[in-house]
Image: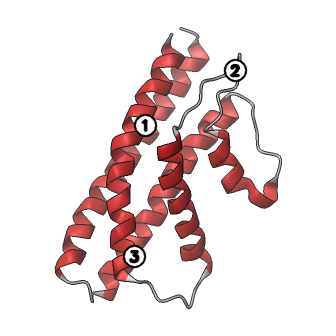
Amino acid sequence: MEERIKVLLAELDAQGREILRLHASIENKVQLLRGVPENEDLTVSLAYKLHNLYSAYENMFKLVAGFFENQIEDFGSYHLSLLKRMLLAIEGIRPAMLTEDTYRILDELRGFRHVFRHAYSYQLDAERIVRLADKSVRLKQIFSGDFEDFTGKLRR
């Protein structure tokens, strides 16, 4: 296996561990919030973890895009373009990294992250945050398969 691919795989594995750590934290916080849904500090904390979770996935996608030199040129919609790029299998370059199901949940997380970052006077809705956290549990399950498929193809 080419040395550069080995380095990429090691970086992806490290980022994957960070993603799993965030998933575990989210699963813990959502259980706490279910017990006290009126707790604003816990709501904000969970929202922040969801924000960080998407950022961790995006950092993984940046590793892939940077390695295979398929940079995003539309800086106005960079985050969406990067996510969409991970759906693509680029013949002779790399396999697709995501399935449609994974993409849909990640796109919802991406949208939430944007609102969380830019709506300073926005009141967070605990129920909405819990629903998104529940979707992140599904994301963890299906992305695991996508990740194994993607890295398995790179190893061949």
Q: What residue appears at the point 45 percent right and 33 percent down from the top-left corner?
A: 146
| Residue 66 marker | none
Q: Position of residue 8 (x, y in %)?
A: 55, 27
> Comparing marks 3 and 2, which lies closer to the viewer?
3
Q: Marks 1 and 3, how far apart in space?
A: 30 Å
Q: Residues within 10 Å of mark 3 (few under 14, many from 20)?
A: few
Instruction: From this view, report whether residue 152 is shown above or below residue 127.
Output: above
Q: What residue appears at the point 51 percent right and 17 percent down from the top-left corner?
A: 153
Q: Earlier in the sequence, mark 1 or mark 3?
A: 1
Q: What residue appears at the point 35 percent right and 81 percent down from the top-left corner?
A: 126
Q: Marks 3 and 2, how far apart in space?
A: 39 Å
Q: Position of residue 100 (x, y in %)?
A: 53, 42
Q: Earlier in the sequence, mark 3 or mark 2?
A: 2
Q: Marks 2 and 1, how far apart in space?
A: 22 Å
Q: Residues within 10 Å of mark 2 (few under 14, many from 20)?
A: few
Instruction: From this view, report whether residue 148 is shown above or below residue 106.
Output: above
Residue marked by disc 1: 14
Q: Position of residue 99 (x, y in %)?
A: 51, 38
Amino acid on which disc 2 is placed: Ile
Q: Residue furthest front?
A: 100
- Could you tell me which secondary element the residue under label 1 belongs to? helix
Amino acid on which disc 3 is placed: Arg
In the image, 53 versus 7, the foreground residue is: 53
> Comparing marks 2 and 1, which lies closer to the viewer?
2
Q: What residue appears at the point 33 percent right and 71 percent down from the top-left corner?
A: 130
Amino acid on which disc 1 is placed: Ala
Q: Earlier in the sequence, mark 2 or mark 1?
A: 1
Instruction: From this view, report whether residue 99 is shown above or below residue 112.
Output: above
Residue marked by disc 2: 93
Residue marked by disc 3: 128
